[in-house]
Image (cartoon, rainbow, N blue to C red):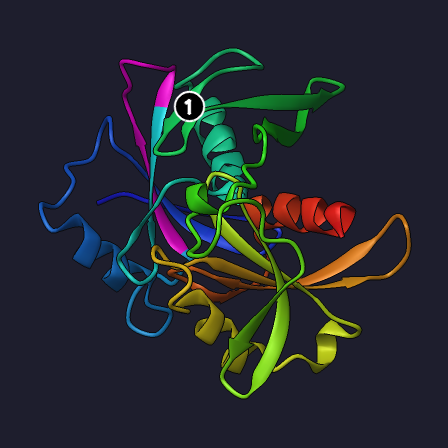
Amino acid sequence: MNFTKMHGLGNDFILVDGFKEKLPADLLKTAAKLCDRHFGIGADGLILVLPSDKADLKMRIINSDGSEAEMCGNGIRCFARYAYERGLVNKEIFTVETLAGIMTPRLVFEQNKLTGITVDMGEPVLERSAIPMLGPAGQALHEPLTVLDKIVYVTALLMGVPHCVVLVDDVSKVAIEKYGPALETHAVFPQKTNVHFLEVLNDQEIKMRVWERGAGLTLACGTGACASLIAAVLN
């Protein structure tokens, strides 16, 4: 099976052209093997470029643990560049079917050179039951949550996929490999969640560390960057 390795800010993916390649029947297990960084190609996820009857193209993304994600911000940027450079689309703005709905990437050109991709990520969903997060109706803003040996204050929202944001004074001091998975699999999140520890540097900059649902520690998260900005504004 032919593949291409791409990354967005270090958030890396294996891309496969579903128009040309025969995909294995046990796709989820295969994705986990391919994403293994020691015995496979190594990636945060496997992305399939597929035909769609609802949009110009369809994107499926399988996390490195073999679970399927609804959306991925950096993933769809890689997807868009891949599709354009291989002639699967020939326009600057096009539509992509995902499990989170129809997304619209836009190719950015400078002097006829592709220099970036932007994506309309849609509106955030703040209602707790839609995230989903257990608890009373309404929003979960700066809400105390017991995690292992600590009480942390979380802001939760849906940005295509569930996100849990924790504001801290210094992200470098967070034991993310301890508290990240504990929050990801916390009982209050029935479909698990992405986790972001967020430090506000000033009124123009924030710094975040990411523990992704289904992928663990990653260098970046596109939907998480959006969720972190929203949480910072709301708080």
The mark tally for this picture is 1
Residue at (22% x, 29% y) in the render: 20
Q: Position of residue 24 (x, y in %)?
A: 12, 45
Residue at (51% x, 82% y) in the render: 178
Q: Secondary structure at mark 1?
A: strand
Left or right, 28 with respect to 70, comes to left
User: Mark 1 — residue?
Assistant: 96
- Which sits in the foreground, 33 or 183? 183
**Relative vertical location of residue 89 with respect to residue 167 in this rendering, above or below:** above
Q: Quadrant of the N terminus?
A: top left
Report the magenta residues as a range: 45-57
Residue at (48% x, 23% y) in the render: 84
**Relative vertical location of residue 204 with respect to residue 108 in this rendering, above or below:** below
Left or right, 27 with respect to 68, comes to left
Residue 48 lies within the magenta run: yes
Q: Position of residue 114 (x, y in %)?
A: 64, 26
Give the quadrant of residue 155. Answer: bottom right
**Relative vertical location of residue 161 with respect to residue 214 in this rendering, above or below:** above
- Which sits in the foreground, 78 or 41? 78
Q: Position of residue 14 (x, y in %)?
A: 38, 49
Left or right, 216 with respect to 36, comes to right
